[in-house]
């Protein structure tokens, strides 16, 4: 067994043929490995106390063509716990593919929220979940009021999560 390839050889096989076959199987296994998408919130650091608004910088790697990155805000005191607020200050986010970085700003409530925690979350969405987020964002932008969106049951993966405190 080499990587994920099982080698089955029948008949009289020389050591050279076996070594060549294993080398080919190893090359095939290495080319089939697809790196997992990942992202890291560079700013703000986890646990930081911040003014509102504040900047968010995210570095991402290996994002496939059929997935979408969204930065959302979650307010722990608001229920249900899976209600999130996409960051739409700059409009609907452009699709991020491959490796790169993105920057946006986030409002951490009002003065009455001083000292309260907020979660900055980076999500990876599939096509269907992204469609739900885009529909929500368009309605939200048109109405000028965003009441939050429930995370879909499927098609969502959390890539990074920081908790910050409103100054």
Image (cartoon, rainbow, N blue to C red):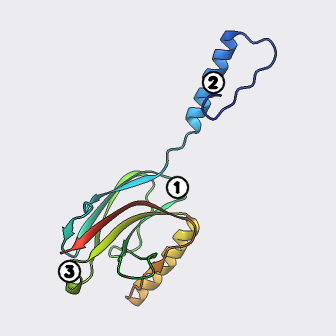
- Residue labelled with disc 2: 24
Which of the two labelled residues, at mark 1 and mark 2, occupies the earlier sequence position? 2
In this view, the mark in front (1 or 2): 2
Among the 4 quarters of the image, the one containing residue 84: bottom left
Q: Position of residue 153 (x, y in %)?
A: 57, 71
For the C terminus, give its image quadrant: bottom left
Please tell me how crowded label 2 is: few (under 14), some (14-19), or many (20+) other residues with Cα within 10 Å.
Answer: few
Instruction: Compare residues 50 and 139 and report the one nearer the observer.
Output: 50
Left or right of 133 in this view: 26: right
Numbered tag placed on residue 131 in the rendering: none
Numbered tag placed on residue 65 in the rendering: 1
Which of the two labelled residues, at mark 3 and mark 2, occupies the earlier sequence position? 2
In this rendering, is residue 78 above or below 2?
below
The CA distance from mark 1 to mark 3 is 39 Å
- Residue labelled with disc 3: 114
Q: Position of residue 160 (x, y in %)?
A: 39, 59
The CA distance from mark 1 to mark 2 is 29 Å
Left or right of 88 in this view: 155: right
Residue under the point 52% across and 69% down: 130
Which of the two labelled residues, at mark 1 and mark 3, occupies the earlier sequence position? 1
The CA distance from mark 3 to mark 2 is 61 Å
Q: Position of residue 147 (x, y in %)?
A: 41, 86
Please tell me how crowded label 1 is: few (under 14), some (14-19), or many (20+) other residues with Cα within 10 Å.
Answer: few
Residue under the point 19% across and 70% down: 50
Among the 4 quarters of the image, the one containing residue 21: top right
């Amino acid at each position: 067994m080499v990587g994920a390839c099982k080698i089955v050889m029948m008949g009289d096989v020389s050591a050279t043929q076996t070594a060549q076959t294993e080398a080919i199987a190893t090359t095939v296994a290495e080319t089939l490995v697809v790196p997992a998408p990942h992202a890291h919130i560079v700013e703000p650091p986890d646990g930081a106390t911040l003014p509102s608004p504040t900047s968010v910088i995210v570095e991402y790697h290996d994002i496939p063509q059929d997935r979408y990155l969204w930065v959302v805000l979650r307010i722990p005191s608001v229920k249900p716990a899976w209600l999130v607020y996409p960051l739409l200050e700059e409009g609907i986010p452009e699709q991020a593919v491959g490796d790169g970085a993105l920057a946006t700003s986030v409002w951490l409530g009002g003065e009455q929220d001083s000292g309260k925690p907020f979660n900055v979350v980076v999500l990876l969405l599939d096509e269907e979940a992204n469609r739900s987020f885009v529909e929500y964002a368009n309605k939200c932008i048109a109405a000028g009021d965003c009441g939050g969106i429930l995370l879909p049951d499927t098609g969502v993966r959390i890539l990074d999560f920081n908790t910050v405190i409103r100054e």
